[in-house]
Image (tube, coloured by chain):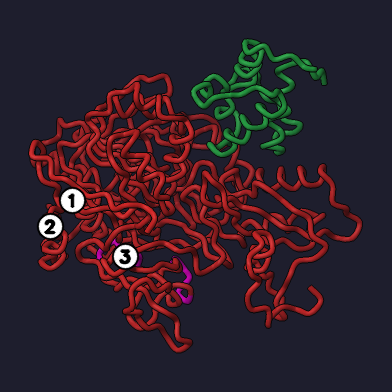
Amino acid sequence: MNARDPVELARAALLGVAPDLAGERIEPDTPFRDQFDFDSMDFMHFVAGLAKTTGLDIPERDYPRLQSLRDCARYLEEHGWRAA
Amino acid sequence: MDHPVIHKRHDAGRRAPHLADYAGTCRAFRWEAARAELAGLPGGSINIAHEAVDRHVAEGRGDRVALRLIARDWSVRDLRYAELAALSSRFAHALEALGVGRGERVFTLLGRVPELYVAALGTWKRGAVLCPLFSVFGPEPIRARMAIAEPAVLVTSAQLYRRKVAPIRAELPFLKAVVLTDGGDGGLDWKTLLDAAADGYETARTAPGDLATLHFTSGTTGRPKGAMHVHEAVVAHRITARYALDLDENDVFWCTADPGWVTGTSYGIVGPLAIGCTMIVDEEEFDAERWYRILAGQRVGVWYTAPTAIRMLMKAGAELPARHDLSALRFVASVGEPLNPEAVLWGERALGLPIHDNWWQTETGGIMIANYAAMDIKPGSMGRPLPGIEAAIVRRTGRGVEAIAAPDTEGELALRPGWPAMFRGYLREDERYAKCFADGWYLSGDLARRDADGYFWFVGRADDVIKSAGHLIGPFEVESVLMEHPAVAEAGVIGVPDPMALEVVKAFVALNPGYAPSETLRSELLAHARKRLGPAVAPRAIDFRPSLPRTRSGKIMRRLLKARELGLPEGDLSTLEESA
């Protein structure tokens, strides 16, 4: 995995919350909830994980912009995330 | 008390609440009078579907909007009472054509889609029994519940069928038909089925005590329990929606509960439709911005939601509600787990209204204890019993129970049976049903206290059942699935405190020889549990232990696991097995 690739970063945060998705194909452009079971608590923990690994502060109002892997990657890039 | 009482002012510009005089209404209340407000069917019959839709059509209100369905892309579809009556009649015909007899079970596994409401009402019209399941359940909870109730029909979507039902289909030989709302492999197509069905259905003349609805709940041990509810429950749903939610036919009402839980049926279908109001149905899951937009844009007047959602809204900050016009909102209520005082007060600041907590259970069928529009709120209290409901704090004496008269004393919350929404049994579990009663009381399993003013305060559960995000989770169901994994020798599951969900599920496992604790194994076990149980029931955390504390008779001592996890006193250890 390329640690700088924001899609992979989001995927890793997702697997941290939902390890049942390991080995499953996750469509980068499809919202999480259309692909697998992912409840509000999962989503909250997912964003917390993403914030922790990137060091970004992700406010609640931005949550709707984090509904798919591609969404997340775009969001991270817009917020100037760069791997160390 | 830490938080000041919220005093209610009477706003001269608005109509008085339906329950304006609590003490007077309680004194004068008779269930017969509440029953007389129903339309009824000939021969003393009561049918929920008739009260919920056909009655309104017969009385000239068919063109009022029953459901306003908001899709993810914000498109809106209105279903009027007359349309809902016609569609549900077609579904009743379809059930009959499929050979579904009266009393047979029809399961739904659906999100908040129009077909859910049509299927529920059509099932009741047929005289069959509705059992709504939670769509976030994994295959195992679905299989376990179906094995108990042996439904004749399942209504679900193609995607849910493929992911959750197809893998267990061979274990469901009792199913006569699967109906898929959007067609596809493995089932009948909803649209084809309804298009072929005739209009107008003569609603089954169900007796007041005929079985209408089955809601599964969880106990500490054993299989899930199917609480059986009857058609006359609509008497209670209607009157409690009036009193505890202050609902009337001119209201726009939004109940955010998932249709798979009892709230989503009692107050997400039956109560508000029996009143004749307009219900908002949002297909989407929780999203703070979206929810405020719906409250403002749809001019919601009465809103019934849950503590976890309220706490998520609190976390989302105060500037969001400030950007929306919430002036139509008149009454806000919450159920699922106790609402913390901070959340009640947050309502006053952010929404301009305090939030009214209330208490009830799958077994009670309807709201039992509540905070009312015209009654002062003590933040943190669940309120006072509904008119017609006698509640008490009792202690178990070994031979039975006795009521505790002294205020502020902790004990088990008990109710005097006899209200119409009361459950009539657990399906095929007479013994477990009988255990819920002693000395003329229904024992709720919740610990509480009552203060000198008659307000009830939730203390905790009397058993090991976990309350998470408004749902009851049976530890045994989770432990059984963990035990299926070859690495697991023993499993004990408890609820640990969580700022959002009240509790979250945590599992402790001891491993079989040949397995060692590791992050990889932890992930593997979490993955296994999520696949089998779904995220709402699966543990959010797993810890490894060399062994788990057991009683001498071999039962895992969850209470002790919990005390050790939370650093609480370990209590009576006299039954603990020596080696643990």
Please tell me which of labels 1 and 3 falls first in the chain. 1
Please tell me which residue is depicted at 56% across the width and 60% down the height of the picture: B474
In the rendered image, residue B435 lying in the magenta stretch gets the answer no
> Residue B298's spot in the image, x, y percent?
27, 26
Residue receiving disc 3: B422
Residue B355 visible in this rendered orientation of the protein:
yes
Q: Is residue B61 above or below residue B525?
A: above
Please tell me which of labels 2 and 1 falls first in the chain. 2
Q: Nearer the viewer, residue A75 or B265?
A: A75
Helix, strand or loop status at disc 1: loop
The shade of chain A is: green
Chain coloured red? B
> Residue A39's spot in the image, x, y percent?
55, 37
User: Given the image, on which type of amino acid does mark 2 rest?
Assistant: Asp
Helix, strand or loop status at disc 3: loop
Magenta highlight range: B419-431
User: Given the image, on which type of amino acid does mark 1 rest?
Assistant: Ala
Asked if marks 2 and 1 touch (Cβ < 8 Å), the reply is yes
Image quarter of the N terminus of chain B: bottom left
Residue furthest out toward the right: B514
User: Given the image, on which type of amino acid does mark 3 rest?
Assistant: Met
Residue B211 numbered mark, or none:
none
Chain containing the residue with disc 1: B
Chain containing the residue with disc 3: B
Q: What crowding class fits label 3: few (fewer than 14 Cα within 10 Å), some (14-19), or many (20 or more)?
A: many
Q: Nearer the viewer, residue B455 or A21?
A: B455
Residue receiving disc 1: B374
Q: How many marks?
A: 3
Residue receiving disc 2: B21
Helix, strand or loop status at disc 2: loop
Please tell me which of labels 3 and 2 falls first in the chain. 2
